[in-house]
Image (cartoon, rainbow, N blue to C red):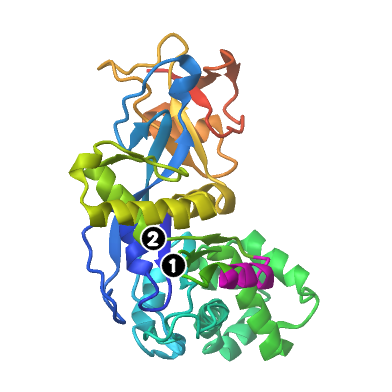
Amino acid sequence: MLVGVVGKPNCGKSTFFKAATLAEIEIGNYPFVTIKPNHGIGHVKVDCADKDFGVQCNPREGYCINHKRFVPIEMMDVAGLVPGAHEGKGMGNQFLDDLRQADVLIHVIDASGSTNEKGESVDTGTYDPADDIRFLEHELDMWYYGLIQKVWNKFSRTVKQEHQQVHKAIAKQFSGLRATEDMVKGIIKELSLQDKDITAWSDDDLKGVTRELRRQTKPMIIAANKADVPGAKEKFEKIKKEFDDYTIIPCSAESELALKEAAKHGLIDYVPGEDDFEIKEPDKLNDKQKKALGFIKDNVLKTYGSTGVQDTLNTAVFDILKYIAIFPGGVNKLEDKDGNVLPDCYLMPPGSTALDFAFRLHTDFGKNFVKAINVRSKLPISKDHKLENRDIIEIMASK
């Protein structure tokens, strides 16, 4: 799974990425800071299974704070997008090519309206951030449309002459973007094109199919960044009503980055995604730091309930992609051979079975699968049993 962070230049996209990953990347108040995509590791937050057993886990990857387990996810911050990207403007061609790999997109917008469509600074509140959502949709839609439009005449004639099934042919054309046959078949039916000769499809028909393909293969969540800037809250409420088919989360990436850096240096206790933090040693903070932390507490955490960064990651992975977190464990003991308690937590796609999980642990476990046991209930489950979020599963395999 790969989470892509997208948006126009200078909207706080790279700050969001750094706040999520603490990766060492360049951040600047000017367009096209990001030229090549940055890769890093973010974390989604899960209620750790250790609390249910009165123990403390020892994560092999990620970390756990106050029984909140932070599980690693791969993230990518790509070059900024400007209108006309699908025609090659700005870093358009590179941006779109980089996006092929992403399973879900986090679209970071400047909710304060202080940057125009090109990412240039303007007076706060003078630009409508709703335009950024519209233009990104348009660029992605035109990118998908362009992938097939340039070969459409030959493609459609070949499909008809060779009596190919339309949904299978289109799915193959978009296989690099994870389109499936069932997905395309459903879209064609939804648009009432199943009985229409493919060579008679209009341009609007083709755009309709590719638009729906984009929505399903590149699902998107909106991170309304700079939500702490005066006037941003009103703009956030407006775009939330206008784009009610999107999940839109108010964010302050700068605040999240400041809190994580302060926690990293031992100045505060902070659990990402929470609505408060605790200053550990006030005497070690200067007046500027105290003022900044006070601003974050009053204008971000008390206003929105969090900085929004962790909420955005969790929503993207668990609500949009519908992944589940599964812990390997044993009925008789939760430790591995080295004594580490619940050292692993795996993110699995929706519909994953016990057998899928066995293969995720090791190919040999999958090939030699005997049975699985739900550690909480201590009951055996079949290989086809669909797992649920936070299950603890013991896999038994023959040697």
Q: Is residue 146 above or below residue 381?
A: below
Q: Residue at x 29, y 77 (%)?
A: 29
At label 2, the amino acid type is: Ala
Q: Secondary structure at mark 1?
A: loop
- Above or below 383: residue 241: below
Residue 2 location (% of width, % of height): 41, 56
- Dot 2 corresponds to which residue? 253
Q: Which residue is mark 1?
A: 226
At 26% from the left and 50% from the top, the residue drawn is: 261
Q: Nearer the viewer, residue 229 or 156?
A: 229
Residue 258 sits in which quadrant? bottom left
Q: Residues within 10 Å of mark 2 (few under 14, many from 20)?
A: many
Q: Secondary structure at mark 2?
A: helix
Q: Position of residue 293 (x, y in %)?
A: 34, 52
- Label of residue 178 in the image: none
Q: Nearer the viewer, residue 85 or 256?
A: 256
Label located before the other in sequence (2 or 1): 1
Q: Which residues are magenta?
A: 234-245
Prevailing SS of the magenta stretch: helix
Q: How far apart are labels 2 and 1 at the CA level?
A: 7 Å
